Image (cartoon, rainbow, N blue to C red):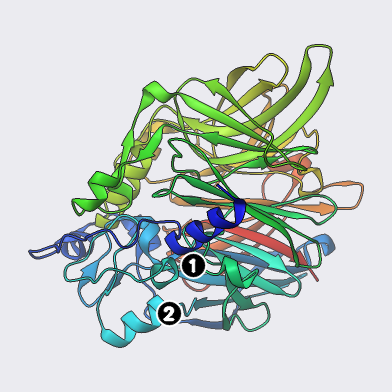
Amino acid sequence: MERRELLRLLASAGALPLLAPLARATGTDDWQADFEAAGTPWKTGFATPPDDLPLTRAAVRGRFPDAVAGTLFRIGPAGHDLGGERYHHWFDGDGMVHRFVIDGADVRHQGRYVATPKRVAEVRAGRRLTEAFGTMPPGVEPPNSADSINVANTSVLPLQGEVLALWEGGSATRIDARTLDTLGVKTWRPDLAGMPFSAHPKVDPDGTVWNFGVSSGQSLLALYEIAPDGTLRRAAAVPVPDLPMVHDFAVTERHLVFLMPPLVYDGKRKEAGASFLDAHVWRPELGMRALVVDKRNWDKRQVLALPAGFLFHVGNAWEEDTPRGTLIHVDYVRSDNADSVFTTNREVMRGRRVKSTDPLLTVATLNLGTGKATQTALAQEAEFPRIDPRRVGLRHRHVVHATQVHATQVRRELPGFGAVARTDVETGRSQRFSYGPQAVVEEHVFVPDGSRPGWVLGTVLDFGRQKTVLSCFAADHLGAGPVAQALLPYALPLGLHGAFVPA
């Protein structure tokens, strides 16, 4: 099939099989009542802010280093309930984008809902009008495009003075970086309108942006290459048999690397009325497939096999040429199964904690010469891995990530993680800082500082005080604790990903 025809099919299909018949849900939803009745103090992180949050000054302890003068943008699901109905999955909520403006001892925060067409229409109607990733609200109509259900809630990409709010299944949404006004969808080229543009683009050290998109119904993988000035260089769609749910990927100097868990879309389930999530089936016999694509020639692809496992996030990848062939080293966060997406991230919408298998920081080695792949799990529970952005696609040593505290008896009843860590993926050595038993850690990012070790910047929900805290650590002395903190006068809903832009 010609590439142009593949693009046409992918653009018309979007990331989801949108026009499949939908089963009308019936009965009374009790998730909102369960959430309101729950006595868990951390449920603040899954509550719905009634409105936008105006620019507010935080109480600062210490002084944020000059290298972190700038803006930390973050985003996550926030609009979890509407008209007495509550979403049944954390990933379904309408996106709220945040900016933390940092200048020494002055930190200000602002949060605004992304005014997607979906959110605007539903708020006006006072009820849910469309299906979501993991929820089929009662009485919804079939969506007419991927962007009609776009919640813009997963990640952000600063690009050419704007911020793109990203989702899995449709277009990026343009956001004004200074006001957080929603400016409309980003269309890279007219024939690419509505194509999926995923939530984890990678930016090479030279500024080139790489991204992908998944069309489950068509089993097509969209690929993007974007110049540092924000113009599209290339886009194509390639067929991938049994294309699974893919959330993240990695780049090296010469390759794109996709770790594909055996969580595969089943169209018959969707036709029977399942949500998009529940249309997926765990097929461990497929194993974890590593798809390696040549950056210069996307028709050159190779698949290697790893043991079955599930992942959300990849840290980084790099390659080296050896007498045995080209080796690609990639670190990622691996779980034994997909319980977290099916159960754990659902039950928090009721204010309940259901523990899933522990995700471990894992290093895989792909030998392109022999076609063999191996992996080693490090003794570190992990999520939200981030590296020095200057090392994307290059050899690196350290990954910053959320992790558990050692007091497992305390952590068992809490969602997420309570500590932040910096782990050497070559030696396995790690240092961590625990925020204490009444905290849920969000993603922390690495901020470079010239030739110095750099800084780690991130947020945490302190549900003991019912407030959100922004902290800054010296990267090489993370275990010593924050050098500065900014305490907001309120708690923000727990979010997903962010990006730092220097002043």
Q: Tell me what residue is drawn at x 60 percent, y 39 percent.
A: 314
Element assignment for label 1:
loop
Report whether 89 appears left or right of 35.
right
Q: Residues within 10 Å of mark 2 (few under 14, many from 20)?
A: some
Residue closest to the far bottom: 124
User: Which residue shows up at 70% across the image and 21% down it?
Assistant: 368
Q: Is residue 435 above or below residue 427?
A: below
Residue behind mark 1:
152
In the rendered image, residue 62, in percent from the top left (x then y), is placed at 72, 63
Number of disc labels: 2
Depicted 435 relative to depicted 259: above or below: below
Marked residue nearer the N-terminal end (1 or 2): 2
- Depth check, front residue: 213 or 491: 213
Image quadrant where residue 40 sits: bottom left
Q: Which amino acid, mark 2?
A: Pro
Report if residue 353 is visible in the image. Answer: no
Please state if 497 lies on the left or on the right of 392 as rendered: left
Residue at 52%, 61% (x, y): give it: 8
Most foreground residue, 48 or 134: 134
Q: Residues within 10 Å of mark 1 (few under 14, many from 20)?
A: many
Q: Quadrant of the C terminus?
A: bottom right
Q: Percent position (x, y) of residue 372?
A: 63, 15
User: In the displayed structure, does residue 311 sit left or right of residue 293?
Assistant: left
In the rendered image, the residue lying farthest to the front is 1
Residue type indicated by callout 1: Ala
Q: Which of the 4 image quadrants contains residue 88?
A: bottom left
* Image point (38%, 65%), residue name: 93
> Secondary structure beneath disc 2?
helix
Judged left or right of residue 391, residue 190 is left
Residue 59 coordinates in the image, percent (x, y): 61, 72
Residue 175 occupies quadrant? bottom right
Residue to which mark 2 is pinned: 117
